[in-house]
Image: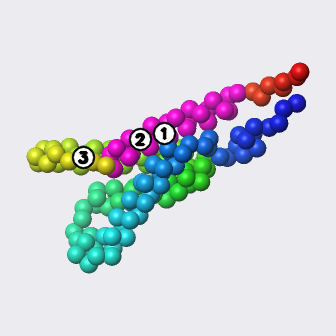
Amino acid sequence: MTAPTPSELRPDLLPPDNFRSVLATLIAALTLGGWINALGRSPLRDALAAQTRLWWIEQIVGFALAIVCIGIILRRRSFLLVAFWLTVYSLVFDLMRWIFQVIDGQMTIRVAFLLYALFLWRLWTARKQVVMSRNTVPVEVTS
């Protein structure tokens, strides 16, 4: 009989991935830092009342993604699907903002877009690893 693998001991954890954790940390830190900055400066805080409903939806999705990223950093498998879809929504919001900026003649490199795209790729990879680990059958090795 073989010793149980770590995934058999803790099936609620995601496979370890340092790159995914770094991306989740960057997304959470930049999102929460942006909120603290906006709420801490009175000119930015005063402009919050004039924002549209769509902007507020984008901010709520971003804030929820920052919270879910903390669960991904802790490698909780239950946050994987939620993180995937919140990242897709955030990616779409950021893509639309970039398109509107290009239409206005502003060419910028969207760091958030790159982070979301890389994070989405790592979440997709983690999802495939989770599916593979569920479909494998532990084999007993005898000598």
Q: CA distance from mark 1 to mark 3?
A: 21 Å
The answer to which of 9 and 94 lies nearer the viewer is 9
Q: CA distance from mark 2 to mark 1?
A: 6 Å
Q: Give percent across and percent down for residue 61.
A: 40, 55
Location of residue 71 with respect to 3 vertically, above or below: below
Callout 2–callout 1 Cβ contact below 8 Å: yes
The residue indicated by pointer 3 is 109
Q: Helix, strand or loop at disc 2?
A: helix
The residue lying at 26 percent from left, 78 percent from top is 42
Q: Residue type at mark 3: give it.
A: Ile
Residue 117, by quadrant, is top left
Q: Is residue 60 visible?
A: no
Please give left or right for residue 44 compared with residue 29 in the image.
Answer: left
Residue 82 in the image, given as x and y percentages of width and height? 51, 48
- Span shown in magenta: 112-136
The image's mark for residue 118 is 2
Q: CA distance from mark 2 to mark 3?
A: 15 Å
